[in-house]
């Protein structure tokens, strides 16, 4: 099937450095800043952003993990429903600026569920969203504050986000299905 490399290793590195700077600029530094990666690939992305921020500002920021999967509820529903599994957030989110990090933003269902899960834990000062690829087709009033690349897609295309940590290689590929 037709495959096209949209972003290479250097492109991913530069996008994450830019996003790291944008996060620091918007929030005027690292005070009260925490990152929460959405499993699977949002986690290595969040860790890379945290490492960039440490290099830039000399400050370590906490990184948590949210595990959310979409599942199709037997035959009774057409829509995929997000299910929140275990979370690894060993800090208090109250009064924090929480930056959610995920690889691809599509309908917005996963991020809506992620926000619910975070709000259940406390009362953040703000929740922001960083995404490597925005592929459009939103079904909720959700948008990302920090975007690596906007990729208008058809519903018949998928984005493959490959990262060293999970896939042994850094690249973003568009594939027709
Ligand atoms: P949404 O909930 O916004 O519809 O979909 C977002 C979730 O599904 C994200 O966690 C994202 O990883 C995954 N997803 C949706 N579309 C794609 C895609 O084209 N490629 C990849 N890699 N993940 C996708
Ligand atoms: Mg995902």
Image (cartoon, rainbow, N blue to C red):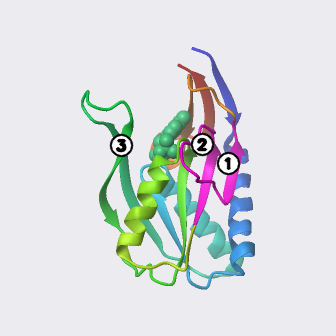
Ligand 1 lies under 8 Å from the Cβ of mark 1: no
Q: Could you tell me which secondary element the residue under label 2 belongs to?
A: loop
Can you say whether 145 is above or below 53 in the image? Answer: above
Dot 3 crowding, Cα within 10 Å, few <14, some 14–19, many 20+? some
Please report the residue visible at 67 percent of the width from the left and 48 percent of the height from the top: 12
Ligand 1 lies under 8 Å from the Cβ of mark 2: no
Please report the residue visible at 68 percent of the width from the left and 69 percent of the height from the top: 23
Confirm or deny contact between disc 1 and disc 2 (CB under 8 A).
Answer: yes
Q: Is residue 144 magenta?
A: yes
The residue at which mark 1 appears reads as: 12
Residue that protrudes farthest toward the top in the picture: 1
Mark with earlier residue (2, 3): 3
The residue at which mark 2 appears reads as: 170
Q: Could you tell me which secondary element the residue under label 1 belongs to?
A: helix
| Quarter-of-image position of residue 155 | top right
Confirm or deny contact between disc 2 and disc 3 (CB under 8 A).
Answer: no
Residue 71: percent from left, percent from top: 33, 39
Residue 128: percent from left, percent from top: 59, 66
In the image shown, does 61 or 141 lie closer to the viewer?
Answer: 141
Residue 163: percent from left, percent from top: 54, 45
Q: Could you tell me which secondary element the residue under label 3 belongs to?
A: strand
Can you say whether 60 is above or below 38 in the image? Answer: below
User: Which residues make up the magenta segment?
Assistant: 128-151
Cα separation between marks 2 and 3: 29 Å
Residue 86: percent from left, percent from top: 29, 60
């Amino acid at each position: 099937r037709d495959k096209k490399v949209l972003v290479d290793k250097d492109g991913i590195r530069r996008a994450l450095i830019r996003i790291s700077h944008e996060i620091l600029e918007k929030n005027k530094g690292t005070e009260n800043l925490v990152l929460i990666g959405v499993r699977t690939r949002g986690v290595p992305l969040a860790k890379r952003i945290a490492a960039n921020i440490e290099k830039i500002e000399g400050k370590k920021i906490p990184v948590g993990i949210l595990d959310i999967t979409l599942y199709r509820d037997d035959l009774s529903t057409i829509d995929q429903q997000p299910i929140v599994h275990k979370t690894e957030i060993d800090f208090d989110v109250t009064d924090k600026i929480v930056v959610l990090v995920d690889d691809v933003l599509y309908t917005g269902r996963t991020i809506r569920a992620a926000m619910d899960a975070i709000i259940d834990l406390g009362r953040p000062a703000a929740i922001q969203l960083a995404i490597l690829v925005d592929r459009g087709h939103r079904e909720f009033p959700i948008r990302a504050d920090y975007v690596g690349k906007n990729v208008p897609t058809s519903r018949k295309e998928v984005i493959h986000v490959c990262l060293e940590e999970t896939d042994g290689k850094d690249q973003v590929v568009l594939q027709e299905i």
